[in-house]
């Protein structure tokens, strides 16, 4: 085969190969959580039962409570819906977040040092009431209870 013909074939093959490189669709970065929620109009929340903040009717499965009511109303005001998708145990939170089963874990809790090593606490969604509980036969006075502190 003449050298000129080989050169043309090599050039055509090179151009075909290079065109495949340039025709590869551009990879886009995955959507952020905020973008996914805004596109879908829905937040997928994981939760655990934590009365009076999150309660569950065992007959109907309906969730109620301070946190449920509050987050549903705040989301609705933003044009979003909270989808309470998964009741999770402590050991299921991170895998559920990592694999996209939930977008966030929606419970009232304070960031603890161990949690902060693994999770982002993006902010508070309001002040929820905390109560002190004592035994019925406690000798604590009302004044002592009024000035009690969490430990």
Image (cartoon, rainbow, N blue to C red):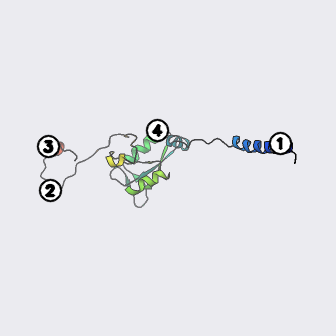
Mark 3–mark 4 distance (CA, rounded to whole Å): 40 Å
The reply to whether callout 2 and callout 4 are in contact (CB within 8 Å) is: no
- Labels 1, 4: front one: 1
Q: What residue sits right under mark 2 in the picture?
A: 137
Residue 3, relative to residue 51: is it above or below? above
The residue nearer to you, when weighing 87 against 111, is 111
Q: Is residue 85 left or right of residue 126?
A: right
The reply to whether callout 3 and callout 1 are in contact (CB within 8 Å) is: no
Mark 1–mark 2 distance (CA, rounded to whole Å): 98 Å
Asked if residue 112 shows in the view, the reply is no
Q: What residue sits right under mark 3 in the picture?
A: 143
Q: Is residue 80 left or right of residue 18?
A: left
Q: What residue sits right under mark 4 in the picture?
A: 77
Q: Earlier in the sequence, mark 3 or mark 4?
A: 4
Element carrying mark 1: helix
**Residue 87 placement (x, y as % from top left):** 42, 56
């Amino acid at each position: 085969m003449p050298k000129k013909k080989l050169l043309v074939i090599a050039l055509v093959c090179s151009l075909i190969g290079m065109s495949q490189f340039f025709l590869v669709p551009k990879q886009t970065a995955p959507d952020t959580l905020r973008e996914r929620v805004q596109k879908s109009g829905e937040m997928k929340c994981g939760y655990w039962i934590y009365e009076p903040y999150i309660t569950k009717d065992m007959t109907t499965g309906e969730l109620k409570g301070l946190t449920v009511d509050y987050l549903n109303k705040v989301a609705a005001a933003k044009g979003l819906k909270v989808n309470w998708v998964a009741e999770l145990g402590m050991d299921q939170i991170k895998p559920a977040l990592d694999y996209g089963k939930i977008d966030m874990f929606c419970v009232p809790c304070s960031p603890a040092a161990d949690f902060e090593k693994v999770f982002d606490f993006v902010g508070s969604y309001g002040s929820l009431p905390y109560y002190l509980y004592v035994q019925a036969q406690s000798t604590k006075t009302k004044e002592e209870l009024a000035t009690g502190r969490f430990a």
